[in-house]
Amino acid sequence: MKIIELLDKKSKNIYENKPITIAFLGDSVTQGCYECYLTSPISLETVFDVKNAYSTRIREMLNILYPNVQINIINSGLSGDGTIGGNQRFNRDIAPFNPDLVVVSFGLNDSCGGEENIKNYIANLTSIFDKVEGCGAECIFLTQNYMCNNVSPHLKDELFINLAKNFTNIQENGILKKYFESAKELCAIRNIKVCDLYAVWEKLSKGG
């Protein structure tokens, strides 16, 4: 990938090459939300932990490999967002930073629309990929983690129980996987690199 070449060039001559900018566009997984709490019987809020967001971890790893390279990280993850929102806010949240690489990660929230929403999901992803290409950046599509596959007996609040039931249905009926399989087919057509995190979760699940 060109991003490796840019990192190498900057590392060899920090004075004549610009800093590297990597932008992340996604939902709560990208934003770095690891907890949620009720704000009312029918609403919740997520907790953002910037230190443990995967974009922060990536910068830490790249700083080890390229200690003298300035790497700018743009975390444009937004809790509750999907491809519709990501597409709409691209020109505000990504394009102005002139990124060298954009990591796009959506599917969890989109999949709540059921199988009939996959066409819209792919159409929105296509538009996002067009925008990435338009700003001259490379792109990686990142599939996401499993949803829950059962309703925990520790859940007591009705909102959380209903959400868990819905997520379990999406996961266990293969709906989420169909979203990511469709996205990977699009990426193959567009020659976009895929980091298949979902496949890693499948291996972990099969291993118990």
Image (cartoon, helix red, strand yellow):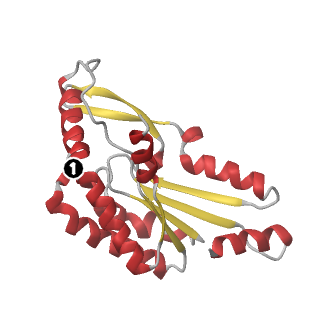
Q: Is residue 4 left or right of residue 74?
A: right
Q: Is residue 53 left or right of residue 201?
A: right
Residue 129 figure quarter? bottom left
Q: Quadrant of the C terminus?
A: top left
Residue 45 figure quarter? top left
Q: Nearer the viewer, residue 44 or 26?
A: 26
Tell me if residue 189 can be seen.
Answer: yes
Q: Residues within 10 Å of mark 1 (few under 14, many from 20)?
A: some
Image vertical order of residue 169 relative to residue 110, above or below: above
Amino acid at pointer 1: Cys
Q: Quadrant of the N terminus?
A: bottom right
Residue 121 pos. (x, y %)? 26, 65
Residue at 71% x, 73% y is: 6
Residue 187 pos. (x, y %)? 40, 73
- The residue that mark 1 highlights is 112
Residue 78 pos. (x, y %)? 40, 50
SS class of the residue under badge 1?
helix
Residue at 22% x, 53% y is: 175
Residue at 41% x, 79% y is: 190
Q: Name the residue at the front extreme.
A: 207
**Number of marks in the rendered image:** 1
Image vertical order of residue 157 relative to residue 185, above or below: above
Tell me if residue 14 can be seen.
Answer: no
Q: Name the residue at the left extreme.
A: 116
Residue 120 pos. (x, y %)? 22, 67
Residue at 36% x, 62% y is: 86
